[in-house]
Image: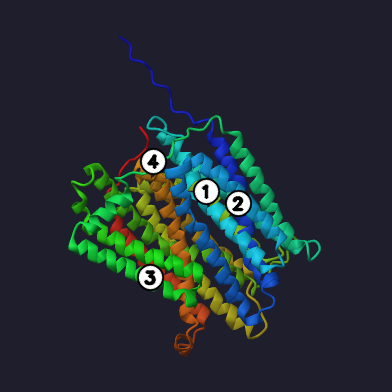
């Protein structure tokens, strides 16, 4: 009897709507983000003394990025428990668009501008864990092999939008009349976000929409709380976690409200998560074994995310620290090259080249050499490459400061080398992490796990603010200057060392991590 033939896996026809939406949204977001530091220094913060503007702009930028990657916790909860992923994306996209409108209308009014940044952080962060997870929902066990390619394509499209935004949006900030420059620079991304929302809505009849799950008595959080409450040791850990979180709030005057609240959450998650891991077996009998083991999987996965946070502390400074360094360097003199922030376009351009190169050339070649290419090995290597990028940036800063005393400038194109190393690290960490997070997450936790992946970016930016606050201490500043180096060079060297240590610990942990497969049946 002839065996029935199984159709070859095909790409779900609804995926282009999601990817098209992501392209427009990312164009707007990266265009706005890449000029934010330049706008703050040159427009909104001009009332501050010159010596304080750079530091204030960096703090505003990283606080905003922290918010963007903090609100995925809310978006993941809304998607998993209340609205489902489709409605969460659609509704928060409207909030997102309103944020751009407020930003463009408040370029000379700090309270309005801050409110616009808040709405953008809420909208962008809220949809962040849902969009990549919504892509994964369109696949099942039959065509999951195509999902890895689509996640790479998804990341490629993100960088396609980012490339053109990095080139074109800075032109809006430097051309035209003075009053209209920032309005155009923030208004154009708003129009693109509105278009992206429309594209997403047009695919509404084709999507696989997994419903939101009701409140689950055996959820990850419920299992963890049971494990902590079930024994004297666990209860002690819970008390320490809450006390540590409250104590972290007292850092608010030094770090700012956003950073202080994020630090409080990090302490709560770190101490509570470690305690839950050690006492997890105490939850057996009160929760099904499969839910206890699911919680164990998630806790192991959160350790991976925690070890990635140093990478994000390095990566996101390319739009703040690196831009401010580039403003001290010599532009190449090309007519379209008007600001150092445009050099960030090299990052997404290189990503678009590296993703297909890695998949078709590099990874097969490494495999033929007898080395197994795994997601965790890619991520460990990516963190190390980010450290190398910062070694070069620190050496460049030494030259910038040395030549600055004689009135000369280092060409800004010298930054292309560290950009290349950082971008290679990004492809190995970020593009890999999106699919890895989805594949490792139990079905009921996919959006929340994606939110924790985004929270890693928040923690990475938190490290930046902590380091910046530390070096403001006069005794620390004097100790650094006594070594014959500037504070900025010392900060750059610290972040490079931070990445190398994180890469070594990550590689050690990766050898002990057991991967699972939670794709839909």
Residue drawn at x 53%, y 41% as measured from the top left: 87
Label ID, residue 246? 3
- Judged from the image, the secondary structure of the residue bearing numbered disc 3 is helix
Q: Residue furthest top?
A: 1
First reached walking from the N terminus: tag 4 or tag 2: 2
Residue drawn at x 54%, y 52% as measured from the top left: 351
C-alpha distance separating marks 4 and 3: 30 Å
Q: Nearer the viewer, mark 4 or mark 1?
A: 4
CB-based contact (under 8 Å), mark 4 and mark 3? no
Is 126 above or below relative to 6?
below
Query: Mark 1: few, some, or many residues within 10 Å (few <14, many ≥20)?
Result: many
CB-based contact (under 8 Å), mark 2 and mark 1? yes
- Judged from the image, the secondary structure of the residue bearing numbered disc 4 is loop
Q: Position of residue 140 (x, y in %)?
A: 40, 33
CB-based contact (under 8 Å), mark 1 and mark 3? no
Question: Left or right: 154 with respect to 37?
Answer: left
Which residue in the protein does label 1 denote? 127
Label ID, residue 96? 2
First reached walking from the N terminus: tag 2 or tag 1: 2
CB-based contact (under 8 Å), mark 4 and mark 1? no
First reached walking from the N terminus: tag 2 or tag 3: 2
Question: Left or right: 398 with respect to 331?
Answer: left
Question: Left or right: 233 with respect to 180?
Answer: left
C-alpha distance separating marks 2 and 1: 9 Å
For the C terminus, the quadrant is: top left
Q: Position of residue 381 (x, y in %)?
A: 39, 58
């Amino acid at each position: 009897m002839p065996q029935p033939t199984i159709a070859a896996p095909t790409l779900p026809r609804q995926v282009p709507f999601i990817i098209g939406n992501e392209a427009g949204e990312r164009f707007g977001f990266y265009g706005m983000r890449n000029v934010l530091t330049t706008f703050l220094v040159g427009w909104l913060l001009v009332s501050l003394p010159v010596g304080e503007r750079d530091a204030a702009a960096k703090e505003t930028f990283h606080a905003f990025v922290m918010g963007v990657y903090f609100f995925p916790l809310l978006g993941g909860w809304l998607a998993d428990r209340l609205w489902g992923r489709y409605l969460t994306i659609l509704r928060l996209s409207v909030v997102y668009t309103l944020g751009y409108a407020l930003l463009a209308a408040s370029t000379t009014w700090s309270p309005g501008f801050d409110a616009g940044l808040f709405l953008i952080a809420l909208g962008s962060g809220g949809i962040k864990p849902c969009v990549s997870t919504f892509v994964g929902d369109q696949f099942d066990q039959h065509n999951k092999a195509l999902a890895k390619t689509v996640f790479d394509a998804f990341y490629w499209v993100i960088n396609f939008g980012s490339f053109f935004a990095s080139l074109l949006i800075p032109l809006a900030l430097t051309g035209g009349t003075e009053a209209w420059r920032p309005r155009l620079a923030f208004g154009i991304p708003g129009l693109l976000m509105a278009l992206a929302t429309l594209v997403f809505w047009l695919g509404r009849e084709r999507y696989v929409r997994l419903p939101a799950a009701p409140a689950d008595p055996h959820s990850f959080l419920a299992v963890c709380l049971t494990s902590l409450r079930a024994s004297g040791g666990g209860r002690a850990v819970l008390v320490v976690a809450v006390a540590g979180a409250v104590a972290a709030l007292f850092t608010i005057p030094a770090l700012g409200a956003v950073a202080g609240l994020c630090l409080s959450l990090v302490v709560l998650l770190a101490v509570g998560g470690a305690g839950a891991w050690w006492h997890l077996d105490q939850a057996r009998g009160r929760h099904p074994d499969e839910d206890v083991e699911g919680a164990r999987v998630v806790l192991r996965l959160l350790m991976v995310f925690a070890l990635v946070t140093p990478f994000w502390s390095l990566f996101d400074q390319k739009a703040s620290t690196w831009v401010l360094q580039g403003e001290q360097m010599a532009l190449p003199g090309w007519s379209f090259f008007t600001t150092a922030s445009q050099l960030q376009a090299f990052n997404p351009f290189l990503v678009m080249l590296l993703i297909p190169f890695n998949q078709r050339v590099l990874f097969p070649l490494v495999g033929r050499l007898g080395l197994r290419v795994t997601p965790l090995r890619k991520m460990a290597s990516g963190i190390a490459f980010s450290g190398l990028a910062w070694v070069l940036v620190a050496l460049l800063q030494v030259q910038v400061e040395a030549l600055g005393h004689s009135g000369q400038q280092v060409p800004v194109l010298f930054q292309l080398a560290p950009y290349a190393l950082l971008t290679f690290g990004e492809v190995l960490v970020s593009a890999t992490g999106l699919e890895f997070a989805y594949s490792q997450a139990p079905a009921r936790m996919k959006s929340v796990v994606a939110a924790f992946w985004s929270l890693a970016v928040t923690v990475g930016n938190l490290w930046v603010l902590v380091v910046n606050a530390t070096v403001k201490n006069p005794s620390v500043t004097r100790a650094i200057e006594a070594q014959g180096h500037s504070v900025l060079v010392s900060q750059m060297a610290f972040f490079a060392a931070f990445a190398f240590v994180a890469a070594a610990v990550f590689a050690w942990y990766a050898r002990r991590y057991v991967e699972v497969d939670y794709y839909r049946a």
